[in-house]
Image (cartoon, rainbow, N blue to C red):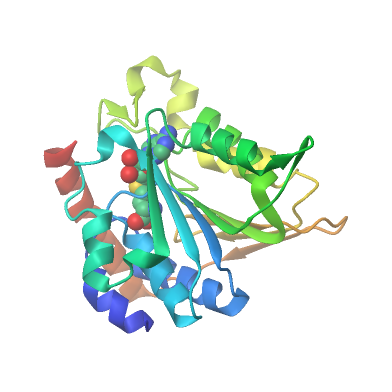
Amino acid sequence: MLFETIHQKVKGVAYISDLNARYLYELIIREKLTNILELGVAHGTATCYMAAALDEIGGGQITSVDLLERETLFDPSPEGQLADAGLSHLVRIVRMQTGYTWFLHDEIKRLTINDVCGSEYDLCLIDGPKNWTIDGCAFFLVDKILKVNGWIIFDDYLWTYGPHREATDGITHRNLSEEERVTPQIREVFELLVKQHPHYSEFVLSRDTNWAIARKRASDKKTYTIEYRQTNKDVLVAAKDRVKRLLGMKFKY
Ligand SMILES: C[S@@+](CC[C@H](N)C(=O)[O-])C[C@H]1O[C@@H](n2cnc3c(N)ncnc32)[C@H](O)[C@@H]1O
């Protein structure tokens, strides 16, 4: 399915910007990434873009994981958006009681034979609670099941636990130290865990779309590229999206 076709169907639904959606879609097609893991689904908008890319390259499988307690929260639902786009057959949605770290436990167990864990995924999009403990742990777990040459994308590189709400994904803001509240925790995961990990050598930070990307390739030579992808028009559209999202949160969370 062409990018423009899926874009017409899901545009305006949170939580992926047009720029990141296009990047993701083109990456999947260019690198032929057919086995994809998505951690954090919400409305399934990113899922739809990824499924459209798989459809374009002749098929594949996306496994998308979210929390059981969020099953009825998102309107439109991921199942609804995928069905409307005719892409449901490419996606398995899994909802877990305590979240994706336990899903990753199950996957490592499934893929372990004689004490060796096999790798199965080409791409993992980590877009959940944006939390040092959960996402730091998720990174090490994902690494075990990610193929060599595979990709990990982190959303929300600069996100912080701000004053705009009481709690995010089970973490009560007032229980955090001031330092934990103001420090972008995905940035810490990326800078302190991912970039230093011996399996990874190629890193891209898209500063203005808040995505940090790592490629699983072992090498002594590490490259770190900082990109700016937005035009002035993109900045205006993103600001409008953010306002819509904040207004939506006020009513939904
Ligand atoms: C920003 S949304 C994901 C957006 C989606 N990837 C997209 O771009 O369309 C974050 C999602 O992560 C989920 N989430 C938060 N903590 C989680 C956890 N520990 N395990 C699984 N899902 C979690 C939330 O329920 C929410 O649906």
Q: Residue furthest left?
A: 251
Q: Nearer the viewer, residue 41 or 182?
A: 41
Residue 87 picture location, percent across and down: 33, 70
Q: Is residue 74 above or below residue 15?
A: above
Query: Is 144 drawn above or below residue 2 in the view shown?
Result: above
Q: Nearer the viewer, residue 131 or 238?
A: 131
* Extreme residue toward the right, this view: 220
Answer with left or right where residue 141 lies relative to residue 43.
right
Residue at image x 53%, y 78%?
29
Residue 75 on image: x %, y %:
16, 51
Q: Is residue 148 above or below residue 55?
A: above
| In-image side of 135 versus 75 (left or right) | right
Residue 158 position in % (x across, y down): 47, 46
List the single residue furthest toward the front: 114
Quarter of the image holding residue 233? bottom left
Quick check: can you spot residue 7? Answer: yes
Q: Is residue 153 above or below residue 53?
A: above
Q: Residue at x 76, y 56 (%)?
A: 201
Q: Quadrant of ligand 1?
A: top left
For the N terminus, give its image quadrant. Answer: bottom left
Is any atom of residue 229 visible in this view? Answer: no
Q: Is residue 151 left or right of residue 95?
A: right
Q: Quadrant of residue 65?
A: top left
Residue 187 screen position, x and y as percent: 56, 43
Q: State the quadrant of the C terminus.
A: top left
Q: Residue at x 53, y 37 (%)?
A: 135
Report the residue at 27% width, 60% height from top.
239
Given the current orientation, which residue lies at the most extreme top position? Answer: 175
